[in-house]
Image: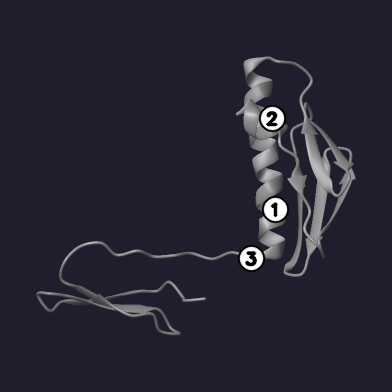
Amino acid sequence: MSRIGRKPVPLPKGVTAQIDGHTILVKGPKGEISRTLHVDMALALEEGSVVVRRPSDETRHKALHGLTRTLVANMVEGVTKGFGKTLEIQGVGYKAEPKPFGIPTTRRRGSRFRWTITSS
């Protein structure tokens, strides 16, 4: 995970980040997210990106380094793109189409069921 942790998290246009100790607040067009991260990890804003640093090369710190960087990257993605889910149906005999109220589905044998995943 330490290779992932070394990469800075870029902040796109319209996204701002504020760091207060071990708490980071990310604001963007879709809202804002705040999270308190592990006390061993150091966060810094550098040249329009968030950088995560670890105190040592211990295995535990390496894992926390990658985890912390990924959590911050997911926060940035959440305030820019929002949350969405993609459903992929594999197999023969399924008929499904997205509707505003969910996904009604029919199997080949005729039994009907509905997934209540809303389409975005």
Q: Work out whether 9 lies above or below 76.
A: above
Counting from the top left corner in percent of width and height, residue 82 is at: 64, 65
Local secondary structure at mark 1:
helix
Tell me how the rendering is colored.
one colour
Task: Check contact, mark 2 vs mark 3: CB within 8 A.
Answer: no
Q: Earlier in the sequence, mark 2 or mark 3?
A: 2
Local secondary structure at mark 2:
helix
**Front position in the image: 45 or 103:** 45
Query: Which of the 4 image quarters holds residue 87?
Result: bottom left
Q: Earlier in the sequence, mark 2 or mark 1?
A: 2
Q: Which mark is residue 65?
A: 2
Residue beneath the point at 70% across and 64% down: 80
Position of residue 92 in the picture relative to residue 61 (left or right): left
Query: Which of the 4 image quarters holds residue 16?
Result: bottom right
Residue of label 1: 75
Q: Disc 1 versus disc 3: distance between alpha carbons? A: 10 Å
**Front position in the image: 66 or 21:** 66
Counting from the top left corner in percent of width and height, residue 65 is at: 69, 30
Q: Disc 2 versus disc 1: distance between alpha carbons? A: 16 Å
User: Few, some or many C-alpha atoms within 10 Å of disc 1 (few <14, some 14-19, many ≥20)?
Assistant: many
Counting from the top left corner in percent of width and height, residue 69 is at: 69, 39
**Residue with the most extreme bottom position:** 100
Q: Which mark is residue 82?
A: 3
The three-letter amino acid code for the residue at tag 3 is Gly
Q: Work out whether 70 lies above or below 112.
A: above
Q: Disc 2 versus disc 3: distance between alpha carbons? A: 24 Å
**Front position in the image: 27 or 35:** 27
Q: Earlier in the sequence, mark 1 or mark 3?
A: 1
Residue beneath the point at 74% across and 45% down: 9
Position of residue 106 in the picture relative to residue 14 (left or right): left
